[in-house]
């Protein structure tokens, strides 16, 4: 059985806790590796390594940092297939989804390749006579990322490139469920020329997370995961004096107006709800069908669901893979029964689809006539379950988003310019799509929700990412009049 160790100073280092966690292939249910979990001493050793590396890395020229970033970008691009293979083997998503995840991660590396432009400060000459004032942005020091199972390559690449390009040393604590892809990405960074200790990988559970939160030499934390844990990390991290950005859960709504292109909306609902088995924080969970489009929309979605091929992600024909664990698969399946008991109409029941083997598969589910008091509406299910709420008016549908505790993403499908304009201005979410179901920003903008979807006030990656991983320093300098210099500068004298 393969054992996965920490990656410290570019070398594999076994955990000292004596505790391990099993890594499985969700498509087969077979254990594929054993993961060593960090002790408090392991965390302290990683932080010490990172702190030592930061002392030198912060002074490395922007030219050298940029060259390493370009090298890293090219290595990730060249190894897309290998990263995707590792993603599919441990997460279960189909290879096309896995390759798409790597592509979105590459956008963030490419943004960081322009770090010399992004770190330009500001300068005012002669703010007062002989006085110049300027502002620069400096790195924070040792920073850490705690990343989720659902995007084990992309989410680390939301933060690692910017953090390191800005001059920080970075500790990655990936999910215990699928650690091989992020570990390989870190190895590629070292191959690109990154000095030892600037990027370390620490494997662990709550013991590691709590020690990172309280360690005085860790200056910032980035987290992506469920809302309860995001809140825990934010509250405890800030209480320990750290800068924290913590992205939580979501219940993303897609409004479909009567004038919408039915085929476009139905295709979008299926891909956005069931892609990656619904294990995406930007997945569409609720379709708000307005007026008389509801019946034909539900019929069109159900028709398309019947054509989806669900199977092992390595199979080229598969369009959706398994869920991450058996426990999570069973929990999602329970929600289907809960929805039926609460009065929702089960149009398509994913529990009825049968699969060979011991993989963690579940068919896609469509629930109609969902209401806001149902558990299937209020809870983040994080699986291939789509609910339809029927609304009489656009305003009623828009208010669903405003009244929801989460505010990650929202989308509208319509041909009406006035409705689209109102939606983009008044939808109570941090990322909004107009005839786009999953409005994840490109790498040169920034990612972040509102309300319980984001704790902290700075979004991830892009310009906001540079802002998060640096702090401003304002400098004021006064120089003597050159005519009074003790060195003869050749200035003419009076008389």
Image (tube, helix red, strand yellow):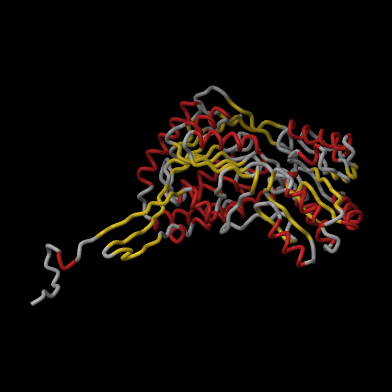
Q: Residue at x 31, y 56 (%)?
A: 476
Q: How many marks?
A: 0
Does 384 sit left or right of 340 as displayed? left
**Which quarter of the image is occupied by the N terminus?**
top right
Depth check: give the residue in front, 321 or 381.
381
Does 271 sit left or right of 212 as displayed? right
Q: State which quadrant residue 333 falls in.
A: top right
x%, y% of residue 118? Answer: 46, 59
In the depicted structure, whether residue 381 falls above or below residue 298: above
Does 378 sit left or right of 3 as displayed? right
Q: Residue at x 8, y 77 (%)?
A: 495
Q: Residue at x 61, y 38 (%)?
A: 230
Depth check: give the residue in front, 154 or 475.
475
Residue lying at the far left in this picture: please name it. 495
x%, y% of residue 46? Answer: 45, 34
Depth check: give the residue in front, 73 or 331.
331
Residue 314 seen: no
Residue 51 seen: yes
Residue lying at the far bottom in this picture: please name it. 495
x%, y% of residue 290? Answer: 85, 56
Does 93 sit left or right of 197 as displayed? right
Q: State which quadrant residue 279 falls in.
A: top right
């Amino acid at each position: 059985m393969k054992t996965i160790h920490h990656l410290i100073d570019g070398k594999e280092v076994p955990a000292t806790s004596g505790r391990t966690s099993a890594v499985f292939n969700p498509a087969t249910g077979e254990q594929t590796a054993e993961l060593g979990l960090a002790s408090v001493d392991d965390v302290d050793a990683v932080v010490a390594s990172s702190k030592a590396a930061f002392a030198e890395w912060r002074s490395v020229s922007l030219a050298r940092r940029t060259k390493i970033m370009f090298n890293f970008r090219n290595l990730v691009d060249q190894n897309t297939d290998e990263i995707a293979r590792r993603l599919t083997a441990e997460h279960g998503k189909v290879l096309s989804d896995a390759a798409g995840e790597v592509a979105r991660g590459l956008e963030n590396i490419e943004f960081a390749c322009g770090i010399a432009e992004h770190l330009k400060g500001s300068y005012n000459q002669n703010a007062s006579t002989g006085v110049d004032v300027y502002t620069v942005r400096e790195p924070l020091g040792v920073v850490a990322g705690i990343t989720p199972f659902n995007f084990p390559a992309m989410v680390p690449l939301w933060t690692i490139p910017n953090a390191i390009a800005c001059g920080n040393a970075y500790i990655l604590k990936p999910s215990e469920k699928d650690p091989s892809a992020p570990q390989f990405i870190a190895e590629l960074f070292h191959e690109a020329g990154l000095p030892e200790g600037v990027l370390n990988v620490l494997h662990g559970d709550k013991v590691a997370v709590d020690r990172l939160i309280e360690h005085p030499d860790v200056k910032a934390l980035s987290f992506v995961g469920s809302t309860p844990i995001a809140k825990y990390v934010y509250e405890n991290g800030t209480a320990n004096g750290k800068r924290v950005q913590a992205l939580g859960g979501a219940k993303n709504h897609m409004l479909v107006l009567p004038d919408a292109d039915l085929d476009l909306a139905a295709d979008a609902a299926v891909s956005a709800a069931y892609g990656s088995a619904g294990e995406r924080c930007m997945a569409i969970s609720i379709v708000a069908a307005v007026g008389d489009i509801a019946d034909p929309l539900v019929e069109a979605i159900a028709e398309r669901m019947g054509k989806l091929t669900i199977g092992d992600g390595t199979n080229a024909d598969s369009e959706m893979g398994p869920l991450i664990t058996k426990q999570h698969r069973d929990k999602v399946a329970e929600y289907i029964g809960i929805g039926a008991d609460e009065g929702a109409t089960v149009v398509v029941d994913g529990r009825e689809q049968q699969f060979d083997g011991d993989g963690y598969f579940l068919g896609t589910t469509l629930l109609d006539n969902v209401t806001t008091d149902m558990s299937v509406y209020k809870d983040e299910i994080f699986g291939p379950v789509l609910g339809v709420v029927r609304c009489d008016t656009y305003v009623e549908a828009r208010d669903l988003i405003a009244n929801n505790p989460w505010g990650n993403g929202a989308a509208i499908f319509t041909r009406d310019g006035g409705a689209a304009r109102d939606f983009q201005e008044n939808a109570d979410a941090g990322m909004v799509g107009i005839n786009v179901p999953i409005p994840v920003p490109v790498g040169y903008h920034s990612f972040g929700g509102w309300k319980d979807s984001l704790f902290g006030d700075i979004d991830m990656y892009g310009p906001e990412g540079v802002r998060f991983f640096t702090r401003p320093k304002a400098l004021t300098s006064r120089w003597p009049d050159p005519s009074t210099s003790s060195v003869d500068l050749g200035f003419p004298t009076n008389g």
